[in-house]
Amino acid sequence: MLTAIPQKRPGPPLSAASSELGSVMRGNDGSVYICQANKNGVQSWKRADGEDVTHILSCEEEARERYYEIKAVGKGKAAPKTAKGAAKKASPEREIERERQPMPARKAPRKAAMKAPRKVAAAAAGRVSEGERPVCRGLKRNGDPCTQTKLNDAGLCRFHAGKGTPDTVSDTRLPVSFKDPYANANPEQAKELDGLYEYLSDHLRTAYDLDLPERADCPVECGLLDSKAGGIGFLHKNEGVPVCGECFSHMVLAVQINLAQLSEEVTDLLGLGEEGLLQLYICGANNCCANWDPFSSSELLRVVSPEHMRQHRQRAEIVAMYNTDVSPHTECAVQRIIKRPNDFPKGAELRELTRDKPTDIDEEYIWEESQGVLEGVQITIGGWFEWIQHVMYPHCPKCGERMTGTVLNIGSLMQTGLEWDDCGTAQIYQYQYQVLAMVHAGG
């Protein structure tokens, strides 16, 4: 039997007379020490630290049976229920084998099993090849692929999974505010407005104005797929800058609308889908006047599908494609959408519809009110067009029917440097959600 040696100075055991594996003795510091072997087979005394070790084991046989229990208590593990199991698990050979076995080798199969379904799903989506880690299917705001590797079962990172539309870049919807036509009207003007709206009740439409910042507040650049006027727009990785079919100069981006940024009521009005890009490119040469007519080869009006949006050129590539004769306009991002529920006809259309107007409605007031509505409006979705001169709706090239569906009314965008001749406007029409046409007229 081993007895305690009363000394205050801590240190290793004073006596190592019994140095067999599993031997137990108490050292100068009052701790229990157990003789064991390391991975090289060298025997050494190891301190058995454990809160439940309150007494000294009195014999080597008991120490051999309870060796694993002492070690388990110190690490917070469950002790074996039987002495036979304890002796088996506490054998030096088993401990040497456990120390020689690397930890990652025991955990690797479990990790592989956990990530296997995600890797298969990502490989099916075409975003990962054999031997690579799967990445998110979503896109960043600048158009680059997302690089996150912590994915859900759908192959999306936490950010794009919460957005719900991972295949578009700027899928954060633009804020919509309401413009009250009675906000600055006195009681007499409000009465006249009531009479005007009542008279034109069959012709009122809802319009959505895309608000652009002032020129001084325009950012240097925004996202490649953001809603904007001017600047650098989306181009597929296999296409170059569009070229005018009349003078063969490079085209520049006039307007780009990301449908995913619009509210549901606006996309329902357009009828072009909830995702994709509506783009208008025009000839960048100042002396080219071929874009007056609809379906002209000097303009490119298209809707880009979400599938094509995933593969695009980088901004620097597109800028390098332009020659010195033509350069893109200043880029100006859309800030918000302003809803106007009572938009009425303007210009020539207004005069045609008010020929039989009641005598209590002043024609001059109607004209001034229509001009006041247009003041500051630069890009409008829906509503009525602003006709500078005469009404000239285009006709569908397939069936010959008049295209009266309103998509966009674009004024002169001074922030970007884009001007339609002498303070003119441009209009984009649609027919049966299939055919798009653009016409512009000067003042």
Image: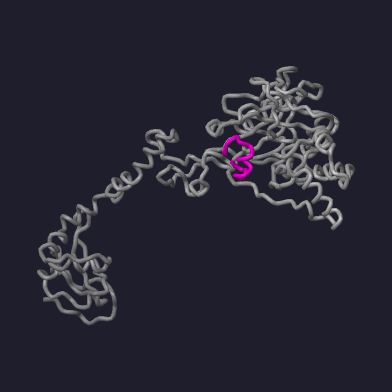
Quadrant in the picture for residue 248: top right
Q: Residue at the location (20% across, 80% down)?
A: 5
Q: Foreground residue, 53 or 254?
A: 254
Q: Foreground residue, 102 or 417?
A: 417
Task: State which quarter of the image contains the C terminus.
Answer: top right
Residue 219 makes an appearance in the image: no
Q: Residue at the location (26% across, 68% down)?
A: 74
Q: Position of residue 154 (x, y in %)?
A: 42, 43
Q: From what the image shows, is residue 287 above or below residue 34? A: above
Quadrant in the picture for residue 256: top right
Q: Residue at the location (56% across, 38% down)?
A: 144
Q: Main secondary structure of the magenta part?
A: helix
Q: From what the image shows, is residue 198 above or below residue 324? A: below
Q: Give the mark count.
A: 0
Q: Position of residue 268 (x, y in %)?
A: 60, 40
Q: Position of residue 173 (x, y in %)?
A: 61, 46
Q: Residue at the location (66% across, 40% down)?
A: 227
Quadrant in the picture for residue 376: top right
Q: Position of residue 415 (x, y in %)?
A: 78, 40
Q: From what the image shows, is residue 414 above or below residue 28? A: above
Task: State which quarter of the image contains the N terminus.
Answer: bottom left
Q: Please say whether residue 266 is one of the residues in the magenta stretch.
A: yes
The stretch of residues the image draws in magenta is 260-274
Q: Foreground residue, 237 or 74?
A: 237
Q: Please say whether residue 38 is one of the residues in the magenta stretch.
A: no
